[in-house]
Amino acid sequence: MNWRTLLGGLLLAAALLSGWALLRDRNQVLPDAGDDGSKDYVLHDFQIVALDEQGHESTTLRAPLLERMRNDETTTIQTPLFLLPDRDGNHWELRSDTGWISATGDLLRLTGNVSGDSPRVPSVPPTTFRTEQLDVFPKENRATSDGLVTLTRPGMTQSGVGFALNSSDKTYQFLSQVKTRYTPRH
């Protein structure tokens, strides 16, 4: 017996066994992959660096857990930390308890202890903001909140209910119940 006959016999046996296994299992109900809530992928203790069109860092994301849902293609993130570089390469920090990203990537919803902090460098006045919820629209360079937002800078604290930020022109506005307190520096 030559090796071709032996190999052909083995392949024929494997094909028959495979066919028998498929026929035997054909009546089993398989879960619908589109509706079972399973995940496409899960990342643990990761860092993702997104680049802009020129190949420079536009955003860095660090978190202990990210899960992308197969059924609706949304993504959830546990305790995300976003690092947003300014023109000088210093990073603003944006944190929250949870994050959620829409399937199209046009909405990032941060909830629970949302905080933003300016870079800790002498050239940038220490600036912070705090809220419980923030919707970020990255493709539109804007962010909004319907809740209470508090913003602090040296010598000034502002707060209000409802907030809109335009990062393109670096403007923000409080929408209602605005309070501003100036603290003179000595």
Image: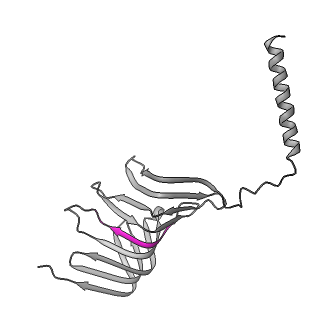
Q: Position of residue 152 (x, y in %)?
A: 28, 76
Asked if 53 appears above or below 184 in the picture, the reply is above
Q: Determine the residue positioned at 79% across, 13% down.
A: 3
Q: Residue 24 placed where, x, y %?
A: 88, 44
| Along the viewing direction, whichever of 1 and 120 lies nearer the viewer | 1
> Does 154 sit left or right of 106 as displayed?
left
Residue farthest front in this picture: 1
How far across and down, in percent of the image, does residue 26 sit? 86, 48
Q: Residue at x 84, y 31 (%)?
A: 15
Q: Nearer the viewer, residue 79 or 171?
A: 79
Q: Residue furthest top?
A: 1
Q: Nearer the viewer, residue 32 or 125?
A: 32
- Residue range corresponding to the magenta coloring: 107-119
Magenta-drawn stretch, dominant element (helix, strand or loop): strand
Q: Quadrant of the N terminus?
A: top right
- When asked about the image quadrant of residue 121, the answer is bottom left
Q: How many marks?
A: 0
Q: Residue at x 37, y 49 (%)?
A: 56
In the image, residue 175 sits, relative to residue 61, either above or below, namely below
The C terminus: image quadrant = bottom left
Q: Locate residue 103, reporting x and y percent.
A: 59, 61
Front residue of 90 and 98: 98
